[in-house]
Image: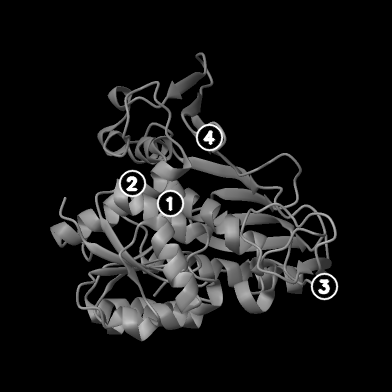
Amino acid sequence: MAKHKVALIGSGFMGRVHAEALRRAGQDPIGMLASSADKSRVAAEELGLRKAYVSLDDLLNDGELDAVHVTTPNRLHYEMVSLALSAGKHVLCEKPLAMNAAESADLVRRAQEAGVAAGVNYNIRFYPLCLEAAAQVRQGSVGKVYHVAGSYVQDWLLREADFNWRVLAEEGGPLRAVADIGTHWLDLVHAITGLEVEAVCADLLTALPVRQRPTQAHETFQEAQAGNAATKAVDVETEDQGGILLRFRGGARGTLWVSQVTAGRKNCLRFEVAGSQQALAWNSESPNELWIGHRDQANQTLLRDPALLTPTASAHAGYPGGHNEGFADTFKQCFRAFYGAIERGDWRESPAFPTFTDGHREILLCEAILRSHRERRWVEVPEIE
């Protein structure tokens, strides 16, 4: 695969993950734009990037660039992505694509008009056994899907002293646990089953309505401040956990539980697809095993081994059986799909990566979920035009 020159916007946790994964995917990350010129320089040095940009204009005027990865706080996505599209750059954006459905719909339109590849980093799709689950559904092994159940739970915001910009509605949006991790589950279920959510019924809870904000910057997933570090009490309106009932078009049902206050669960996504022929279950904390449930024979556990997988899943398994793959590998495989589509020029017809349309779908879902919670009723999800 040809190397494409890529700039990263955002030097936090996700920006650093992207930089490493781009290299592993055979691409060429060349520069960084952080929140200040000094932070850009420091991050570029630490990550071995040869350019430290001083402004977004500086980055977008770099004629050497082919693509831009946006990994900044959510409120900045729309403007940065819009400008990158106007500059003719391919764009891969962290989720959520924008702060509301009007913005995300506009970005879908802008990307189509710009004629560039435009993706959203729903990387969990690219665990090989998630791809295998999708292949088994599509080839008919599961039969008709009756229902899907699952959860995405973490503990990194369990305590009052745990703080991150994501807890603030003005930075991340009015939804947090659902938008931050629940959308990964929703996107994954759509990618596996092909089912579209028709309506939702949600009940959300802010377990910690007041949190202690450190007076100095605090990195995502970093331990809460220790000792007598200075903090300031802030009111929090975004949810810590929630339960959502789903009704899919065609009649299937679903249930989703999300939480960022479940002690001991570091980053655990689980799903179970129940079909008329068999069931499939997977857990991200044991990502190299896919459980296959049967009625009239012994259940199975399929281990991630390229020799045992369908061709689509095998193509995204980077190591032989017995050599485990995990979180970092999903970014590599997502980026390989994105830049492979650019090289082939087929991102318009049959994109192999999560697109801006997928990002827009998730924002429509989030808005329906929030409305359902506030109005205490089932809410229909608008169809994507």
Whether the residues at callouts 1 and 4 have beta carbons within 8 Å, the answer is no
Residue in the foreground of this view, choosing between 65 and 156: 65
- Residue position for label 4: 282
Q: Which numbered circle lies on residue 232?
A: 3
Residue at disc 4, secondary structure:
strand
State whether residue 73 is above or below residue 275: below
Mark 4 or mark 1, which is nearer the start of the sequence?
1
Question: Between disc 1 and disc 3, whose residue precedes?
Answer: 1
- Kindly report the distance in space between the C-alpha atoms of the residues bearing marks 4 and 2: 19 Å
Q: Quadrant of residue 130?
A: top left
Alpha carbon distance from label 1 to label 2: 8 Å
Closer to the eye: label 1 or 4? 1
Q: Nearer the viewer, mark 3 or mark 2?
A: 3
Residue 350: which numbered mark, if any?
Answer: none
Extreme residue toward the top, this view? 298
Instruction: Give the distance between the C-alpha atoms of the residues marked 4 and 3, in whole angstroms.
Output: 40 Å
Viewer-proximal residue among 53 and 385: 53
The x, y position of residue 209, in whole percent, is 83, 67
| Labels 1 and 2: the sequence-earlier one | 1
Circle 1 residue: 123
Identify the residue under disc 2.
333
Query: Badges 4 and 3: C-beta atoms under 8 Å apart?
Result: no
